[in-house]
Amino acid sequence: MILKIKNLFLKNFFNLSTNQFINVFFTLLITPLLFRRIGTEVFGLVTLCFSIVSLISVFNSYGFNLNSPKDIATNKNNRSFLQILICEILTIKLIFGFLLVILFSIIFYVSELFNQNNSIIIFSLIIIFSEAINPFFYFQGKDQFFNLVISNFLFKSIYFICLLYLIKSDQDAYLVNFLFGLTAIFIYAFYWINIFKNEEISFTFINIKNLIVRIKDNFEFMLSSIWGYISVNSGIIILTGFVSNVELGNFAVAQKVGFFLRMFPVMVTQSILQKSAILYKKSEEDLVSYLNNIYKYSITVSFFLFLIISFSSEIIIYILTKQQIEYSQNILILLSIVPLLSVLNLKNMIFILVEDKKRILNLSTWLSTIFMLISAVILSYKYGGYGLCYSLILTEIINFMACKILLKLKNNVKT
């Protein structure tokens, strides 16, 4: 049994690692292409718009990425349950997506926050629809991460080809994020058609009362997702108010790589969450032993990632920009510390999720996000991009301490 679980973890982690390799590979292709064709300043604006729309999309996900994989994993063979769950999630996300696109289209159009670059943010809103039908939660719950790898490869391949032929200058910058969202919609829709066919389920309209119940049940998970996303990804939005567009572009290059590094602890959590939920139902002692082993390996790997980035940051930035930008190199080294600290919170997060401790998750992410927002504004004002990195590092420490203390107060976790 233990060997089977270990093999499943290795398979899941391998697939997720392959998925990240695909992301890195296409980033190495796409970033220099965009950097050269639309320029440093516009590249920074495109990245900023992507971050803003991704933040809006977190409202649309409504926290289903946190609890629905566990629900699917523990009810894999219950076809009627899966049909209701999937239809409810997709219905809620599509309704919210439609409302969010209309609302923010009006806000951005009327306010003209981006002045002459308003078209970039408006066309980026299509990403909200793509995230509404993202089948990742289903793949995770079913331990079908290989399908995730294939869908991501198809998505990024088509997206790269579109950029290659359609993006010629900074005048085409509004298409960068639009093509991202449009390509994702086609690929995700194709996969949902196959999922419904293979599971022999059909899309059905859900009773309004059931939707309201689902929305109420997931409200705290939604808040946790929002706080967590703001804590990790809103930094570049804050930084915009304190640095030039050129510095913003140079920071964005390093952030591209930093984002992939930050995914390491997320990948580990995604790889073990389903089996952790099953183990927890059978024996909490077995779960603790399992997590302790994963914990040691994860810390070791993340430490070596930090060392690799520290010694190769100059090469990485040069590959991405064809320039030697010392500022971007230093930012990348600082950002590589973040996943190392994030791994420390691995066990805490697993117990919070498998025990369905929504209150603790919401409170801990709320506290860390408030700290991040305050510290990011102060430190970005004083030190620019370096200050933002210091804020992100400190936030991971605060998040770990908050989760640890709140769980100890509940006295439900063996440490």
Image: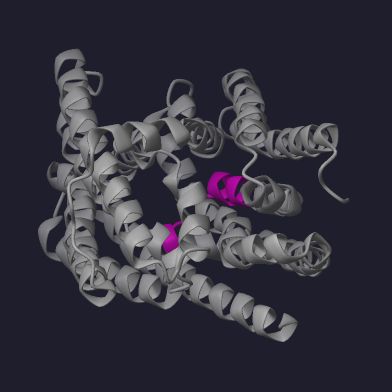
Left or right: 286 as drawn, with respect to 70? right
User: Which image quarter is the N terminus in?
Assistant: bottom right
Left or right: 409 as drawn, with respect to 223? right
Front in this rendered view, residue 47 or 349: 349
User: How far across and how far down the image is residue 40, in percent?
Assistant: 34, 44
Q: Is residue 393 above or below residue 24?
A: above
The magenta stretch is 320-333
Residue 322 appears in the picture as rendered = no
Residue at image position (15%, 63%) is 162
Q: Is residue 339 above or below residue 291?
A: above
Residue at image position (19%, 59%) is 183
Residue at image position (23%, 66%) is 201
Front in this rendered view, residue 72 or 18: 72
Q: Main secondary structure of the magenta part?
A: helix
Residue at image position (43%, 61%) is 320
User: How far across and how far down the image is residue 29, in percent?
Assistant: 34, 67
Residue 345 appears in the picture as rendered = yes
